[in-house]
Image: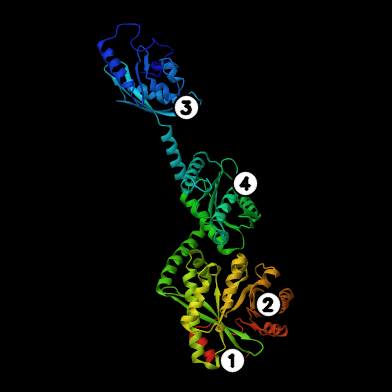
């Protein structure tokens, strides 16, 4: 039976009118009369050949009408079905009448009297050998809405309303398929990771962090073209699909726009904050990649951008996969190293220029890998920062340095005024348990507070000025001296610097190394020394490698220095020899 068999335009009135009814028809009508009144669903029966249709009062009520407001005619039903659903409904009905399907089951939208569309589930079955069908309709609008809400929850981020990773990969797959089939322009996938997002959460609260994410979402969305997709794929991580770019420069140009947008101040929880981020960019090649691979490539490039820090974005190339694999292996081994106690400390001497004697050791962590040997900190500290392992590792460094210095002070009484300097990472500085851990380390090892210096970098200090100020004051109250490490490489205002309880500035090695040949570097060192004197602080110059640099620093009345001119970092035994037979410089 074709579609034309059910496209009727009129009817003979109510079922059974206009002629004698057979007993079967009369019996069916009687049965329907007794059940229709109490039925929750809308009931109907239809002699298709004669186009005799009967609709129950409940059927009409479902679409908002009274029993006498809709004639019992087939076109009254069909014209209320949504145009996009009508053909499928007719095909389902035709399959039942032609015997290709044992029952009718169809979902479609019908127009309600109030102008809204209601989702209807229609069931029906064929009776006898004639084209006589009967069934029911049920309003499933509420169910459809709940299904839609479940789908939205499954494929969208609840905070920002953006597609989640699952939906992003689905859209990326569609774009890759289209590119491969039609030879369209390449796709670009960007992975964005906000920098120091946890700082906002810690300092202003989780609600402020959510507010920041929503604001960033709105700003990036304003940069998108029609067909592009922005998704939230992690806590502070976003993925962007540029569906067709002319060349790599177009993708990097978009990355520059995102970076510039992030640098504009945002108002969050009544406070002006500045966001920044690292981006990785990956381009498709003739649609041959899997979506997961393309997103992973962008993530790999993002990690390298974050580690390098020279530029806010990196473009993926295949060689990065080997670097990513190496990083993954190191990360796995680093977890084991934390459990197995594979770390050790080396100590670099710090010389007091006024006396020529050893003033302190800076404790520097090393990793004694069971297979790879001694691993430099620049290869694993950033991984420890990203994974959070820096907290247990930093706590071990603190305790071990305190233990060793207490042992040396007991063994070499003549060197009992030598101190040990320990670096604190940005994550440690933000840890609310830091002060308690430092106090416990001193108490458990028996080291006097005057034997410990703590060093924090200028950039980490300025990230959370109010909270860091309170932390430093609490540490200073323990009797510990505080140093700002890598001074000159970050940005700190004089007002902020003056308010921190800091005892010493450490001039970064990039300014000291070669200062005897470059007047610009020498001038920076002079400026730092003048600033330190104004603030009542001492100075340690890092990176001294020549006698000429040493003499220049002495002429500038710099108090302390360290570098390979004096010694490279020493293992514990070699450092003890300095205490046993202290050299003079």
Residue under label 4, please give it: 223
**Label 2 sits on residue:** 514
The mark that comes first in sequence, 1 or 4, is 4
Distance Cα–Cα, label 4 vs label 2: 45 Å
Proximity of marks 3 and 4: CB atoms separated by less than 8 Å: no
Could you say whether the residue bearing mark 4 is in a helix, strand or loop? loop
The nearer-to-camera label among 3 and 1 is 3
Q: Nearer the viewer, mark 1 or mark 2?
A: 1
Above or below, 536 relative to 149: below
Query: Is residue 288 placed above or below 108 in the rendered structure?
Result: below
- The tag on residue 84 is 3
Q: Position of residue 152 (x, y in %)?
A: 47, 42
User: Which numbered disc, 3 or 4, marks the residue that appears first in the sequence?
Assistant: 3
Marks 3,1: beta carbons within 8 A: no
Q: Compared to 175, does 468 lie above or below?
A: below
Q: CA distance from mark 1 to mark 4?
A: 63 Å
| Disc number placed over residue 452 in the picture, else none | none
Instruction: Identify the image quadrant of the C terminus.
Output: bottom right
Instruction: Decide: few, some or many residues near mark 4? Use Cα within 10 Å; few <14, some 14-19, many ≥20.
Output: few
Mark in front: 4 vs 2:
4
User: Which residue corresponds to mark 1?
Assistant: 583
Residue 266, located in which quarter of the rendered image? Answer: bottom right
């Amino acid at each position: 039976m074709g579609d034309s068999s059910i496209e009727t335009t009129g009817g003979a009135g109510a079922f059974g009118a206009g002629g004698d009814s057979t007993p079967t028809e009369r019996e069916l009508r009687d049965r329907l009369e007794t059940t229709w009144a109490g039925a929750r669903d809308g009931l109907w029966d239809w002699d298709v050949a004669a186009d005799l249709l009967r609709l129950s009062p409940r059927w009409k009520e479902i679409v908002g009408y009274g029993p006498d407001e809709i004639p019992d005619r087939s076109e009254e039903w069909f014209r209320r079905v949504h145009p996009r659903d009508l053909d499928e409904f007719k095909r389902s009905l035709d399959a039942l009448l032609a015997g290709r399907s044992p029952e009718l089951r169809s979902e479609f939208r019908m127009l309600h009297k109030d102008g809204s569309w209601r989702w209807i589930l229609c069931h029906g079955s064929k009776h006898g050998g004639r084209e006589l069908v009967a069934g029911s309709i049920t309003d499933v609008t509420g169910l459809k809405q709940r299904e839609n809400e479940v789908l939205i929850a499954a494929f969208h981020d609840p905070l920002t309303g953006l597609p989640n990773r699952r939906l992003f990969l689905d859209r990326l797959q569609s774009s890759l398929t289209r590119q491969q089939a039609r030879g369209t322009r390449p796709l670009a996938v960007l992975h964005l990771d906000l920098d120091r997002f946890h700082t906002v959460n810690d300092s202003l609260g989780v609600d402020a962090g959510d507010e920041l994410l929503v604001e960033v979402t709105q700003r990036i969305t304003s940069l998108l073209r029609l067909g592009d997709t922005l998704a939230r794929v992690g806590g502070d991580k976003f993925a962007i699909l540029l569906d067709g770019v002319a060349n790599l420069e177009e993708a990097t140009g978009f990355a520059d726009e995102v970076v510039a947008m992030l640098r504009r101040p945002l108002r969050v929880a009544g406070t002006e904050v500045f966001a920044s981020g690292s981006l990785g960019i990956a381009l498709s090649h003739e649609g041959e990649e899997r979506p997961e691979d393309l997103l992973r490539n962008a993530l790999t490039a993002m990690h390298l951008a974050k580690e390098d820090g020279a530029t806010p974005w990196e473009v993926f190339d295949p060689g990065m996969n080997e670097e990513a694999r190496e990083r993954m292996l190191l990360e796995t081994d680093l977890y084991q190293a934390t459990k197995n106690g594979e770390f050790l400390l080396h100590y670099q001497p710090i010389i007091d220029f006024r006396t020529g004697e050893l003033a302190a050791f800076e404790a520097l962590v090393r990793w004694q890998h069971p297979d790879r040997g001694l691993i430099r900190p620049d290869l694993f500290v950033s991984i420890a920062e990203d994974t959070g392992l820096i907290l247990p590792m930093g706590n071990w460094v603190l305790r071990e340095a305190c233990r060793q210095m207490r042992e040396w002070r007991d063994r070499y009484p003549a060197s009992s005024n030598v101190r040990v300097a320990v670096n604190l990472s940005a994550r440690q500085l933000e840890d609310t348990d830091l002060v308690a851990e430092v106090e416990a380390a001193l108490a458990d090892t028996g080291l006097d507070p005057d034997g410990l210096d703590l060093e924090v970098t200028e950039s980490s200090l300025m990230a959370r000025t109010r909270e860091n100020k309170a932390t430093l004051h609490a540490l200073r109250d323990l009797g510990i001296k505080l140093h700002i490490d890598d001074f000159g490489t970050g940005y700190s205002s004089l007002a902020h610097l003056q308010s921190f309880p800091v005892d010493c500035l450490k001039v970064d090695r990039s300014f000291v190394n070669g200062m005897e040949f470059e007047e610009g570097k020498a001038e920076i060192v002079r400026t730092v020394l003048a600033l330190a004197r104004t603030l009542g602080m001492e100075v340690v110059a890092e990176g001294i490698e020549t006698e000429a640099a040493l003499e220049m620093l002495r002429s500038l009345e710099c108090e302390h220095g360290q570098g390979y001119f004096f010694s490279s970092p020493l293992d514990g035994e070699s450092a003890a020899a300095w205490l046993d037979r202290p050299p003079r410089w």
